[in-house]
Amino acid sequence: MPSRRKKEWFDNDSFWRELYSFLFSEERFTAAAGQVAQALALTKPPGKTALDLCCGPGRCSVALAKRGFRVTGVDRTRFLLNKARAKARAAHVKIEWVREDMRDFIRPNSFALALSMFTSFGYFEDRQEDLAVLRNVFRSLHPGGVLLIELLGKERLAKVFQSTSSTFLPDGNLLVERREVFDDWTRIRNEWLLIQGHRVKRFRFQNNVYSGLELRNCLELAGFAAVRLYGSLAGEPYGPNAERLVAVARKPRLST
């Protein structure tokens, strides 16, 4: 269960309910198997136990379980975990679902692999809390275990940044996204307007943005070694044309 903290933007179930079809389209679920295969090729985990951190509706958890992994999916949002349970039942796979804040979840020396996919890292106002999450993951991995983080890097954001954009959703509603970078290019403030006929629903959220170097430094501060950066799950270089920032970091085998 979540610890007693102040309510934060991701605690708003309405955000996930109203925007579910946009954030988690069927195409994204279909793509999960290939993405997990790529992640495994990059990480080469030393075992078949996996932590899917901020697992959401279970895209990657189900894909891992289908490949024979013993999976623990952790998320704070009840609505998304209910979706994940339904997906696992439909796929006839068994997964452990844990409703807990990623700042609190620690299971020492329990996993060969940890995944943080789809920009699920950087949710907190204080970057020290991001670092605490990485330290939790470090403790939760077996010695020799490996973490993969996949997100939108600061370099890519700077290249494609638009202050406003709009998208028609599958249900015909219009989503208008407004963005503002602040705090010396360390954070991004988002306002999403969901326009349903004559009704407008407003959602606001913020998150930290990391460059490749900043993410590498955080991982090393958390204790990880052999950090490698890629520009995609396919293993492309993290260079000027990188569309995503993928970090692969390993817990040293002599760590306790």
Image: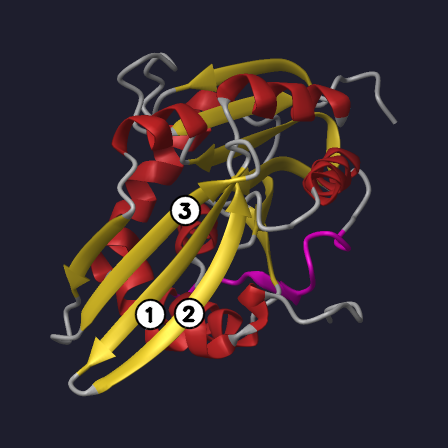
**Where is residue 68 shown, x and y percent of the image?**
48, 45
Mark 3 lies on a secondary structure that is strand
Q: Start and end of the magenta stretch?
A: 92-105
Query: Label 3, label 1: how many angstroms apart (C-alpha)?
Result: 20 Å
Nearer to us in this view, 231 or 167: 167
In this rendering, the answer to whether 60 lies above or below 58 is: above
Query: Label 2, label 1: how many angstroms apart (C-alpha)?
Result: 10 Å
User: In the rendered image, which residue does mark 2 sit on?
Assistant: 203
User: Which mark, residue 19?
Assistant: 1
If you read the primary sequence from the N terminus, does the residue marked by circle 2 or circle 1 appear first? 1
- Taking the spot 46% from the left edge, 64% from the top edge, the residue there is 204
User: In the rendered image, which residue does mark 3 sit on?
Assistant: 180
Amino acid residing under circle 1? Leu
**Where is residue 128 shown, x and y percent of the image?**
75, 39
Q: Residues within 10 Å of mark 1 (few under 14, many from 20)?
A: some
Magenta: main secondary structure equals loop
If you read the primary sequence from the N terminus, does the residue marked by circle 3 or circle 1 appear first? 1
Nearer to us in this view, 4 or 55: 4
**Where is residue 139 shown, x and y percent of the image?**
79, 36
If you read the primary sequence from the N terminus, does the residue marked by circle 2 or circle 3 appear first? 3
Tell me the quadrant of the picture where the C terminus can be found. top right
- In the picture provided, is 207 more to the left or to the right than 159? right
Residue 154 occupies which quadrant of the picture?
A: top left
Amino acid residing under circle 3? Glu
Indicate whether residue 104 is drawn in magenta.
yes
- In the picture provided, is 42 more to the left or to the right than 196? right
Residue 233 visible in the snapshot:
no
User: Which mark, residue 171?
Assistant: none
- In the picture provided, is 206 more to the left or to the right than 161? right
Amino acid residing under circle 2? Phe
